[in-house]
Image (cartoon, rainbow, N blue to C red):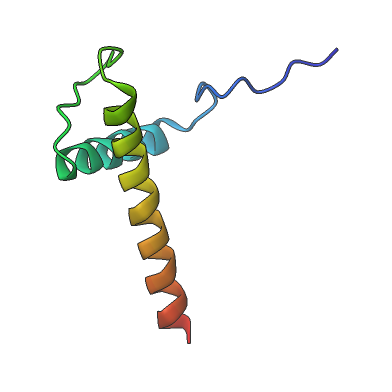
Amino acid sequence: MASTNNGSNKGMVPEARAAMDRFKMEAAAEVGVDLKEGYNGDLTSRQAGSVGGQMVKRMIESYEKDMAARG
């Protein structure tokens, strides 16, 4: 059977990975979560969810802004 994507970012372009890491750090700072480079397994589910939620919120805002600019 063919292998499936297990959700890891191993195939991600290095520049994209760096941009995503910066984005994640910015989102963490916005919600007051002390995110470190590397392992962050000590975060609570609430903290991790706050960071992910902030990232989604910013992506939606960016999409809406882009759509409004297109007319």
Most extreme residue toward the right is 1
Question: Which residue does the image show at 42% across and 60% down from the upper left?
Answer: 60
| Residue 16, position as x, y percentages in the image | 41, 38
Question: Which residue does the image show at 50% across and 25% down from the upper left?
Answer: 9
Horizontal side, residue 24 vs residue 2: left or right: left
- Location of the N terminus by quadrant is top right
Horizontal side, residue 6 vs residue 69: left or right: right
Question: Which residue does the image show at 14% across and 27% down from the upper left?
Answer: 34
Which is nearer the eye, 46 or 38?
46
Which is nearer the eye, 67 or 48?
48
Answer with the quarter of the image where residue 29 lies. top left
Question: Which residue does the image show at 22% across and 20% down from the upper left?
Answer: 37
| Position of 9 relative to 41 (above/below) | below
| Residue 11, position as x, y percentages in the image | 55, 26
| Position of 68 relative to 25 (above/below) | below
Answer with the quarter of the image where residue 24 lies. top left
Most extreme residue toward the front is 46
| Position of 1 relative to 51 (above/below) | above
| Position of 54 relative to 1 (above/below) | below
